[in-house]
Amino acid sequence: MLHSAGSVLTVNVGRATITDYTECPSGTGIDKRPVDGPVRVTAPGPKGVGGSGLAGDDVCNTRFHGGDHQAVYVYAREDLDVWERELGRELPNGAFGENLTTRGLDITGTLVGERWRIGRELLVQVTAPRIPCLTFAGWLDQRGWLKRFTQAAVPGAYLRVLEPGEIRSGDRIEVVHRPDHEVTVAFQFRAVTTERTLLPRVLAAGDALHPEARAKALDYVAKAERRRTAAADR
């Protein structure tokens, strides 16, 4: 059974631009703008090799961005509206470097592993929250932005592509699978930023986790077990 969730307000892509706030020699594609007409979305390939999942969208620093598990970045218009009021400035669709600006979907409360049908063809799966970087801070040009964004814990979500397809502004988003665990986008974000004791519980999301997030959680659990063993031996 399909469950109505929301819609795509705009599909946003960005071209590489050389700036003074990123050290990547090829620049940054964070300045994303809404585009007319359909955009093809596919799995771009492994991180470090593949970039964005959207045709015509540039990912410059493939060490940290892009790849199959970060193929599409989504942010809710409702959350942008809150930031507009807090920052006292206009934030047009695409302002956070998101590929999809949505309406009617609680991105923060979305579960890792949730699957969405977007339009008629595209099937995606939620993999991870966005972790803010220096390029994001430079682009926003907002004092203390990394700390402020982290404390708010409204990070938006990355998606992997399960079935490729074309999408466009106005497409309906349907939640076709919602897993049975507690690991929301916000929960995972807090676990990897401000509340690391939550990391073991992130593993409940299983194979849906971004591989880097899974490795980080497993490493935390292993170190905690070694500390317990060492304490017991003393």
Image (cartoon, grey):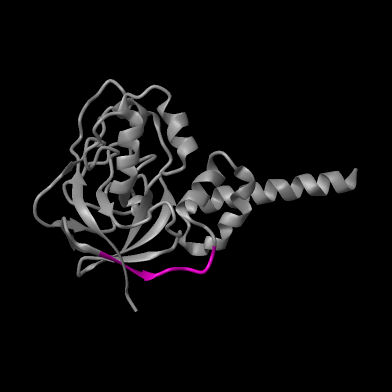
Quick one: which residue is furthest to the right in this view? 234
* Left or right: 139 as drawn, with respect to 166: right
Name which residue lies at 30% across and 35% down. 84
Instruction: Tell me where residue 41 appears, x and y as whole percent.
Output: 22, 57
Residue 76 visible to the viewer: no
Which image quarter is the N terminus in? bottom left
Where's residue 80, x and y in %? 31, 41
| Chain part drawn in magenta | 173-181
Is 227 in front, or is 186?
186
Residue 79 seen in render = yes
Residue 157, how many percent across, how many down? 38, 50
Viewer-nearest residue: 213 or 139: 139
The residue at the point 49 percent across, 46 percent down is 189
Residue 150 relative to residue 140: left or right = right
The answer to which image quadrant residue 148 occupies is top left
**Rendered position, 214 above or below 193:** below
The residue lying furthest to the bottom in this view is: 1
Q: From what the image shows, is residue 46 above or below residue 172?
A: above
Q: Is residue 195 above or below residue 117?
A: above
